[in-house]
Image (cartoon, coloured by chain):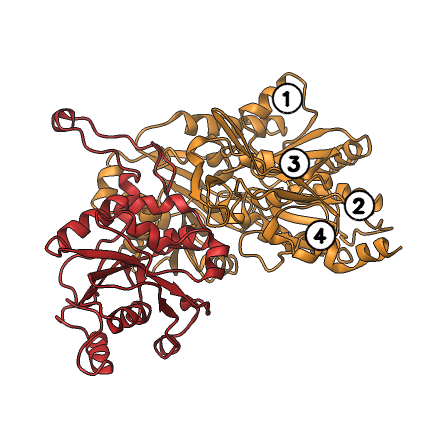
Chain colours: A red, B orange
Amino acid sequence: MNCLWCNEEIMNEINWSTLVFPTKQKNICKRCEENLAIITGSRCNHCSRQSEIRICNDCLWWKNYNNGKDTIVFNYSIYSYNNDMKEIVAKWKYRGDYELGYLFTHSFGQHFRQKFKSKKDVIAVPIPLSEERMQERGFNQASMLASFLPIQTKELLSRVHNEKQSKKSRNERISSQNPFILKGSINNSVILVDDIYTTGTTIRHAADVLVKSGCPEVFTYTLIRS
Amino acid sequence: MEYDSQLRSPDLRKYIGKLLLQKEIPQGVLSSNHFTQIPSINRKTFHYQCHRCGNNKRSLFGKIPCGLCQKEHLYCRSCIQMGRVMECEPLFYWSGEQLSWPSYDAPLTWEGSLTDAQQKASNNLVQAIQEKEREHLIWAVCGAGKTEMLFKGIEYGLKVGKRICIATPRADVVRELKPRIQDAFQEVPIEALYGGSDDRVGESQVILATTHQLLRFYQTFDLMIIDEVDAFPYHHDPTLPFAVNRAKKSTCTTIYLTATPRQNLLLKMAFKQLPHTFVPVRYHGHPLPVPELKMSYSLHKDLKQKKFPKHITNWITNRPKPNRQLLLFVPTILLAEQVVKNLQDITNGRLGVIDSVHADDPDRIEKVDLFRIRKIQVLVTTTILERGVTFPSVDVVVLDAGHSVFDEAALVQIAGRAGRNKKDPTGEVLFIHDGKTNAMVRAIQSIKQMNKRGGFSL
């Protein structure tokens, strides 16, 4: 097995404990794994941003903006968006290196089990790509992430084409129109899955659509908090 | 006639001699019958090969569920930086009318003169091109003035209307070569292609490019000059020679340039399969500085404790010519930053400005320029500055020369950074180690050997 990122061969350490209890082969080497920064320590309980305050100012703003009750219950993210992660995401999403998504198979499932264990009868809904973007990229990174989860996945949303979020400023993002449309009906609680939480506009737009059609609770689970 | 006029239109010229993905060619142009398709990935039971980059490692092929044809199929992960090659999309090369490149009467505007040794190499080069030799190696010591030797060869090529490519594995070398070549051929349009370059089209007669960029070209060059052929990653990554070979016409002449040929070329020369010219003297006629080895028993311990060995600081402050700038090579990026800090603490500004540069440094180009105009006195660098760069007057120190990144070729090249200027043709070269390696010994041997062949007694 070669590391998916640096393509060096991965050599597993052999000692008594791995001999007796063989560990699962990883697809990322130790060195590359160390470069990915998992968010640890204190974080905003609401959006997973690394911060000393329990609920950060952005989240208070969102609460205010939505008249006292935010559309999402909370967002949980695993990694912070450091330079190594930026490179990986750029190659994965924009260059279209599909296999790189498998770097996160293990961690995305594991953190899910830790954080969302108590939630029963939830379904995962990936944030969709617009038709045009799908043509261009050939795959949806959020659907890929959702497929790593041990719960049912439903593609409930569709998206009208507009400009890339990553090309807009913060204000442009927040004031942009809601591009999502619900395709079916929904009674369960939902975990929205996406790759990056930046301002939180995209997922709140999606959550809006779900809540309005009767979804009781919307959680969001994102790989990266930038 | 309409066909002909289409070709003259600049819109189409940029597709000539290229191998492209479907999405790199606009729909209207694609349907004009100027292109031939080839399959993009060759798939056999146990063997895949990407037809753009030649990659055949299984670990560098991925499987993707294609959103368009609703099937899972292969894509190449090796050349994905140049756009994704998918199994379901063919590659296209230009098979319409070929453009005949203009012939220049007197393209060379360079007015310098060559030394005897350079002249000899230059003559051999022109002869090789005239007689359409397939390959020719110019083995010239560091600082022999390789670029100037090329001028006559390029001039001859331009006179007879050849398309010329000067390729090298390193983007820094391309950046350094571009103004020098453009200066020498002021009338001729020259494009420099490297990751992040301003020129992107690749439609001019003379192309300067990193070997990576040649992945997009298809049987178009009559003269291929590969500078620093032994540099990383060319000798390391089989897709690059593949790309270079594909970019050549079948009648192409290939010129290799290097100061430190590797085993494969040395063997070919020994078996007389590769005509070559050896240039053993530097352009200013002085010998290569021979490195000095210095043992530092506690080197690794000191570096681990973030200390800087004291006798080395002493050596640095008590150099015979303290006016020279200092180029300090270290094996890793981490060490580079740490050494800068230590040196600053120890010397208290006695050495002037100290800075570090490495491949991931966003300001690397600016810092190298600052060093060149003596705004920085000590530059701590990783191996990115080992070759292709010229500083007028420097002393060179290699810290931890026993590290595996410093192989024989690297050490010879590093030693060759010193004494490159006519006004200051010597320089100190110091290898600091905590145990001699074969690479160090061989590097010193081969430098002495080259000096001997250049007629200098030891």
Q: Dot 3, crowdedness within 10 Å: few (<14), some or many (≥20)? A: many
Q: CA distance from mark 2 to mark 3?
A: 17 Å
Name the N-terminal-most of marks 4 and 2: 4
Q: CA distance from mark 1 to mark 4?
A: 48 Å
Name the mark on residue B246.
Answer: 3
Amino acid under label 4? Ser
Residue placed most toward the observer, B350 or B29: B29
Q: Determine whether label 1 and label 4 are within 8 Å by CB.
A: no
User: Which one is closest to the eye, mark 2 or mark 1?
Assistant: 2
Name the N-terminal-most of marks 1 and 4: 4
Above or below: residue A71 compared with residue B402: below
Amino acid under label 2? Gln
Query: Is residue A50 visible to the viewer in this orientation of the structure?
Result: no
Check if mark 3 and mark 4 are on a common chain.
yes
Residue placed most toward the observer, A59 or B118: A59
Label 3 is found on which chain of the structure?
B
Name the N-terminal-most of marks 3 and 4: 4
Which residue shows up at 51% across the image and 47% down it?
B84
Check if mark 1 and mark 4 are on a common chain.
yes
Name the N-terminal-most of marks 3 and 1: 3
Image coords of residue B294 (percent x, y): 35, 35
Amino acid under label 3? Arg
Image coords of residue B243 (percent x, y): 60, 38
Name the mark on residue B98.
Answer: 2
Q: Secondary structure at mark 2?
A: loop
Query: Is residue B425 visible to the viewer in this orientation of the structure?
Result: yes
Residue receiving disc 4: B31
Name the N-terminal-most of marks 2 and 3: 2
